[in-house]
Amino acid sequence: MEFGSDVLGKLVEELASLPSIGRKTATRLALHLLKAPREEAESLARSILAVKEQVGFCAVCGHVTEGKICSICSDDTRDRRQMCVVEQPADVLAIERTAEYRGYYHVLRGAISPLDGVGPDDLRVKEMLERIPDDKVEEIIVATNPNAAGEATALYLARLIAPLGVRVTRIARGVPVGTDLEYTDQSTLASAMDGRREI
């Protein structure tokens, strides 16, 4: 689409470079910002700069934080015997929303994917291994994504951790709540059958 404005076109390009934002959505956002009051655009710009200047990664687990240590790692009421290993900080937020898990986390910041040039040395695996004896961890819950990269990462971690005498578990996969079985894909249904438990 031709805007007749290099400035607007550049904003669309920048927005479209963000994850999950296609060109259509980027165009809608750019046009919204054009129509919005100046204060709204300035507030957004200030928020983006503040994130870049004030937010970093926890020195312990790798989750996002405004200080050196995140609020989860600073919480002494959590169960230090459990460590949930995830790929990205967004995964921590998703698990925390369930309010079911009260242990600690370790963020790898990616998954093993040779096709994308990501190997074990590109992840925060060494830091995880160092934490296991220090924190007296008894169970590692591997909560990587249920895709090829996530599965490869889970298997790699399980092989590394097994000799340490620590229990390694994998989050269950199955049929989403509210879904009819006839519309569930074959691999999800197979995983659900495989991971069945007594009721």
Image (cartoon, helix red, strand yellow):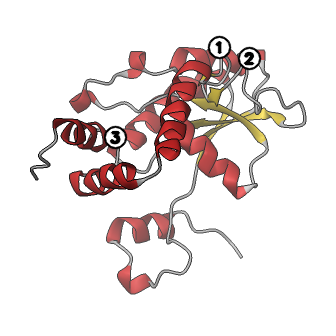
Return the x and y of residue 83 as percentages of the image width and height: 69, 34
* Amino acid type, label 3: Leu
Which tag is nearer the camera, tag 1 or tag 3?
Answer: 3
Viewed as shown, does residue 165 lie left or right of 195? Answer: right
* Amino acid type, label 2: Pro
Query: Quarter of the image containing the C terminus?
Result: bottom right
- Name which residue lies at 30% across and 56% down: 25
Reply above or below: 194 against 109.
Answer: below
Disc 3: which residue: 18
Counting other residues with Cα less than 10 Å from the Cα at mark 2, is it few (<14), some (14-19), or many (20 or more)? few
- Name which residue lies at 31% across and 54% down: 31
Disc 2: which residue: 133
Return the x and y of residue 49 as percentages of the image width and height: 51, 26
Q: How far apart are marks 1 and 3 (CA)?
A: 34 Å
Return the x and y of residue 123 as percentages of the image width and height: 45, 22
Residues at marks 2 and 1 touching, judged by CB atoms closer than 8 Å: yes
